[in-house]
Amino acid sequence: MSLIKQLWLAIIVILLIALGGSLLVAVTGSRAYIEQELEIKNTDNANVLAQAISNAPNQDLVGIELMISAQFDTGYYRKLQLVDGEGRPIIQRVSEVAEDHSVPGWFRQLISFDVPSGSAAVQDGWTLLGTLEVDSTHAFAYQSLWQSTLRMAGWFVAAGALSLLIAYMLVRHISRPLKTVTRQAHDIGERRFTIAPLPRTLELREVSEAMNRLSESVREMLERESEQIDRLRRQLLHDAITGALTRDAFIDRLSYSLEQDGESSYGIIALIRATDLAALNERRGHLHTNAVLSDLCQRLTAIADAHGEGYVGRLNGSDFALLLCGNVDEAWARERLSDNLSALAEQNSPVLRLPAALGTYHHGQSRTTLMSALDGALSMAETRPGQAIETCRHAEQAALYHSRAEWRSALVEAMEHGVLLGQYPVLDRQGSLLHHEAPARLNIKGEWRQAGTFMPWIARLRLHDSLDIRVIDTALETIHHHRQPLGINLSHAAITQPNVVIALQQRLSARPDSAPFLWIEVPESIARADLESFRYLCQSLAPFGCHLGMEHVGAAFRQLGDLRDLGLSYIKIDATLCRGVSHRPEQQTILRGMATLCHSLAIKAIAEGIDEDEDIETLFELGLDGVTGPAVSARADAASGR
């Protein structure tokens, strides 16, 4: 039994004892008082009537009977009788008044007045004629005591109700901080280390202070651990001078983008070359040259941050790369790149030049071919005067449509005919299915097209919300029929537009049995850029029991402690940290720490983009909970005999 129920039970028992006891004492006291009054009345009436009979001039039996009858007829007596010395009645009058039904019989039996008769001697001079006995009726006494009892009971009920109301307010005042402490204890049990306001109740205040200290110490420990892991990650994957990704890390990121079937499988890539670094170093010194390269990296990072999901890498001493994933306006990217490169070059003219090559990439494209085309364009840019930006002329995808109207019509029609969800397995340590990654595909011109084909136009035409709702409907329908967990991606528009969140809530409410099979994830860049919208999404979906997670987690891992109260179920660690881990001890150290920290927050850690079979076992040995990628899909196909 809970403490609140015990408190309520104690209050009710105390009230019943107090009010019931008071009522019993009051009724008992009234009964004794009435009995005493009736006894006095009987005695007084007997004495008065006996005196009147004794002083009467005519004391024959007829006269005496007339006097007794006259007194009896007043109606307030049960019995009047004159008895002789041996107790035999000489004259007797007994009331035959009907029982008063206004007083319950059980009350009469419970009270049952015991009043002795009043008696007085009747004399004729010195001769004793008999003894007069008087019994008053009890009907009025029962009725009076019953009415008094009802009034007292009513007052006690009102007093009890008022006492319960006061007790309710008191218990509510006590239970509010108690609920806060209970909620905080529940949060700690679920690895969400919240800080609760201190209650006024001294005992609860001490408990809350202790739990707050526990939460604060654990939070600080998690922050220290995440910062240490982030430092190791930056030392391993980032250039020490500029902070850009190393060549290997950037190439891994680019390869993963070209391989995966999602929103980051297309976008814009640029190569930038800092020329004459030797001359700049000779003229202005090594420190200045490093500062220039660091400034260049910061400017490129600012462009990536302004877009949302982007990466900056240093391919060698003088070459830098900028990867902007998803839908990007090429004119915007060229303008931002040109402005930043021109400003930096002017600050260090005439020694420094920053030629660049700009191009697009898409799913399935050969990384070698793409980089070769960019290198050729960059070489041409070097031959041009000024801060030239050369457009990469690699082979482009064949254009399906040539106007916005055609694309809008085709996309709306394709979404009306339904969405096909791909299935890429995410497996746990035992080889069991955690969920299927389910990127969306649309049937355009009679062929199911991957996201890289239509997502740029979905973004340009602002059809994200329509596509997200279609994906949600298809996922829940698939789960309903096959009872297999599916993981879907939501766009940035989905978490910032309330209509998508409301539609998702309505659909999960309609199919509560399917909600636990639904895994919803958003890119790390969205969670970082719009934390409040992501928080709103998590809070809105928390009651339904679906799984919420982030994908491509890398730089945001140090913010994981800030996200601990959102109810995240899992994160997918970026491929740049997971690929080739079996040959890289430094990455193993980082991933082991990330897995441990995730488990301390009750969050599953999943590695994405795994393309080598030997990496799978290594990742599980490091403590990760799941893996996904080409090697995982191949293993799943082999296990199923496909």
Image (cartoon, helix red, strand yellow):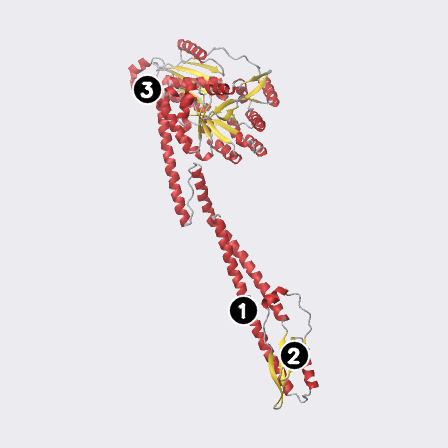
Query: Going by the image, does 106 lie left or right of 538?
Result: right
> What residue is disc 1 on?
29
Label 2 to label 1, Cα distance in Å?
A: 28 Å
Query: Going by the image, does 617 lie left or right of 471?
Result: left
Crowd band around label 2 with a 10 angstrom C-alpha radius: few (<14), some (14–19), many (20+): many
Above-or-below relation of 82 to 110: below
Tag 1 secondary structure? helix
Of circles 3 and 1, the one toward us is 1
Label 3 to label 1, Cα distance in Å?
A: 101 Å
Tag 3 secondary structure? helix
Tag 2 secondary structure? strand
Crowd band around label 1 with a 10 angstrom C-alpha radius: few (<14), some (14–19), many (20+): few
Query: Going by the image, does 291 lie left or right of 509?
Result: left
Where in the figure is residue 171, as x and y percent of width and height? 48, 51
> What residue is disc 3 on?
290
Crowd band around label 3 with a 10 angstrom C-alpha radius: few (<14), some (14–19), many (20+): some
Residue 106 in sight in this render? yes
Of circles 3 and 2, the one toward us is 2
Lower position in the chain sequence, tag 2 or tag 1: 1
> Which residue is located at x 60 percent, y 19 percent?
410
> What residue is disc 2 on?
80
Tag 2: amino acid: Leu
Where in the figure is residue 515, as x and y percent of width and height? 54, 32
